Structures are given as C-alpha cells and as structure tokens.
Image (cartoon, grey):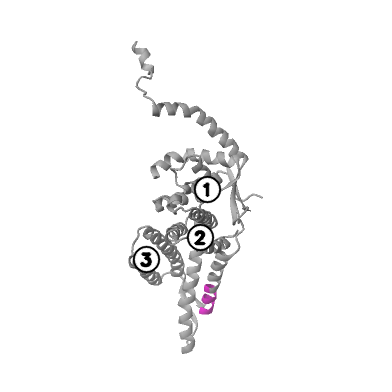
Amino acid sequence: MSEKALIKENNRLREKLNPHNKQVYEDILIYIRTNYTSDDEETEEILNELLTHVIQSQRDGKNIESVTGEDYKSYADSIIEELPRRNLWKFAGIIAVVFLGITYLFSYLTDLIFRLIDGAPTTITINLLAEFIHIIVMSAAAVGFVFLIFRTMQFTLFKNWPVWKESGLVFLIGTGSFIIIILLAFLTDLIDIGPSFEISMWILILLGIALVATGLWLIFKPEKNAGRYEKQ
Amino acid sequence: MTKRTQLLKGIMEACILKIINDDVVYGYELSEKLQNLGLDAVSEGTIYPILLRLQKNSFIYSKKRDSDFGPRRKYYFITEEGREALNLMIEEWDKIAEPIDTILKEDTQHVRKSTDKREQ
C-alpha cells in the first residue's frame, strides 16, 4: 500500500477508537509523524499496525496503556529509534525548492503587477553575488524553520498543556523565526558588490513557478520503492 | 519500564524470532502468544520496535494477507538469515542460561575462586 493509501486507512480506522484511546493514539501519531528523520512510508506502516493492534485490544476490553505502557513518549521514542532513516538531504532539498519558488513568485509578482499598472519597465537589476547568497541563506532558513516547527510540536506533546499554551508556543516560535527570515532576506539584499545584470521579471516569476512545480512533483510523485520489506 | 526493557530487548528479540519461526503471525497474535506464555509484564506494544529491528536485519519479512475475518493484516515470516540467527541465539542462550540462573538465585559466596588454590 502506498503512503497516501495508508494515511487514508488510518483516518478511517481511527474513528473506531474510544475517546481516551483516540487522544493518546493521536498524540503518539503526531509525535512520530513530526519526526522528520524517519522514512515516511515505514512510519505510516507501523502507525497503522499499532492502530489495528489498539483497536483489537479495545475490543478485548483493554486500554491503550496495555499496548504502549504508561509512558507514551518513551514508547514513541522506542519506535522512532528503530524506524529506517529517510534521506534527509532530499527532504531538506524539497523544502528549500518549494520555499524559494514561493518567495520568487510572491515578491516579484506583486512588484510586477504594480509596474504593469504604472506602465513602468518590467526589467530589474540583479546583483549576482547578492542573489547567490540570498538563495543559500533563504534555503537554509526555510529548512531550519520547518524543522524547528516540527520539533516544537513534538516538544509540546504528552505534556498535557492547555491548548492556548501549546498553540501559543508554536505561534511565538513561528512568528519569531519568520521575522528572522525577513531580516535575513533584507540583509542579503543589501549586498552590492560584484557583477550584476538586468533580467525581465517575467523570467523570475516563471522560475518561481518552475521551482514550486518541481517541489510539488517531488512530494506527490508515486513512490518507486513502495513495500520495500515485502517479498513476493 | 524503560530500564527493564533494556534488559529484555535482546531476550525478547530471540523469543519473537522463535515464535515467528514456529508459525506465521501478525502483531496482535504475536503479543497474545507472548502474554499467554507468561510474558505479561511486558506491554504488548514492545513487539513493534523489535519487529522493526528484526526487519532491518533481514531476519524477518512482512506481507499483507487477508485474514479469516476482519481486515488485511501484516503477517511476519522468518528468513533464512533469521533462522541462522535464531540458532545462534539458542546456542548462546544454552551456554549462559544455567550459570546466570545459578548466579542470580544461589549464594555465590562458597564458590571457589582461582586464588583459593594459590593460598593453600
């Protein structure tokens, strides 16, 4: 079964859990899923296996604690520890490509619309060095941002914090790092040494579209090594 | 539980491998067997990290199959490497089981030391 089919199945089966089991299971699920170092497909496989186990235990009159033990976090950690690692570079690469695409698209699209309204020229001057550093710094920042949000979500799980505290922390860290990203973008744009060239904004917008499309294709393309452990 | 699990990890690995060797099982069945054999102090879910590791080592593999009733289930099968590993584990266990039992349960104070001879 593909990763998407597994997730669908999980969403359907999860409804069979009683409220307590569901809440605990979902915490474990989020904790394991936000662990970005694990292979996606294997993660979904084991999550479904665990889910069917808990459902069967529930039918036999047992609670989720008889499956996971009282310490949910260390149980989830013991699973993560044994999950095959995913290709982190590829994962980070996809995040960077999508993020760069989006920034190109939005920063130049709004600019272009205003210029078209004003009848101003649609070519801009780009500093080669600044653009290069901009791409490197922004990619790193985007990847760092996503990983940080995942870690924060993991951190708040199993703590029984009230919702306001949980979402408050995610919000603070989210906006905080967003401000840092904007500052970094602003600083790299100040670089003004080395060669520069003129380029039509249409090309930059097309580049943005191409980057986003590539990223989305990489995320949603059918997996080649589906069912790696299965032997026929 | 975590401390105990550390000690149990290796032994559990051998037990699970043996059960899969004797019969093809899916997760829930496996944990039921362990419980019925008396290993009920271990949470049922402990099997999943171990199953993952056994798969990583290619000692077992899994295959989804229709069950007699209910949904498709993931069944586990032992591989040739798994059988070899199991035989090795059983061999190792044979060597240490008795001495460990003696050490942990009996008074070792009267056991002779090699230095005793020299002192005589």
Residue B98 in view: yes
Looking at the image, tell me whether mark 2 or mark 3 is earlier in sequence order. 2
Q: At numbered mark 2, what does the secondary structure look like: helix, strand or loop?
A: helix
Viewed as shown, does residue A96 lie left or right of B26?
left
Q: At numbered mark 3, what does the secondary structure look like: helix, strand or loop?
A: helix
* Residue at the spot of label 2: A91
> What amino acid is labelled 1 in the image?
Leu
* Residue at the spot of label 1: B52
Disc 1 crowd rating (10 Å Cα; few below 14, some 14-19, many 20+) is many
Q: Which of pointers 2 and 1 indicates the residue nearer the eye? A: 1
- Of residue A178 and residue A43, the one placed in the foreground of this image is A43
Using the image, determine if residue B1 lies above or below residue B71.
above
Using the image, determine if residue B32 lies above or below residue A22.
above
Cα distance, mark 1 to mark 3? 32 Å
Q: Residue A170: which disc?
A: 3
Going by the picture, which residue comes out furthest to the front? A61
Span of residues in magenta? A201-208
> What amino acid is labelled 3 in the image?
Val
Q: At numbered mark 1, what does the secondary structure look like: helix, strand or loop?
A: helix
Q: Are marks 2 and 1 on the same chain?
A: no
Going by the picture, which residue comes out furthest to the right? A232
Q: Residue A25: which disc?
A: none
**Residue in the image at 55% along x and 57% along y:** A41
- Magenta stretch, main secondary structure class: helix
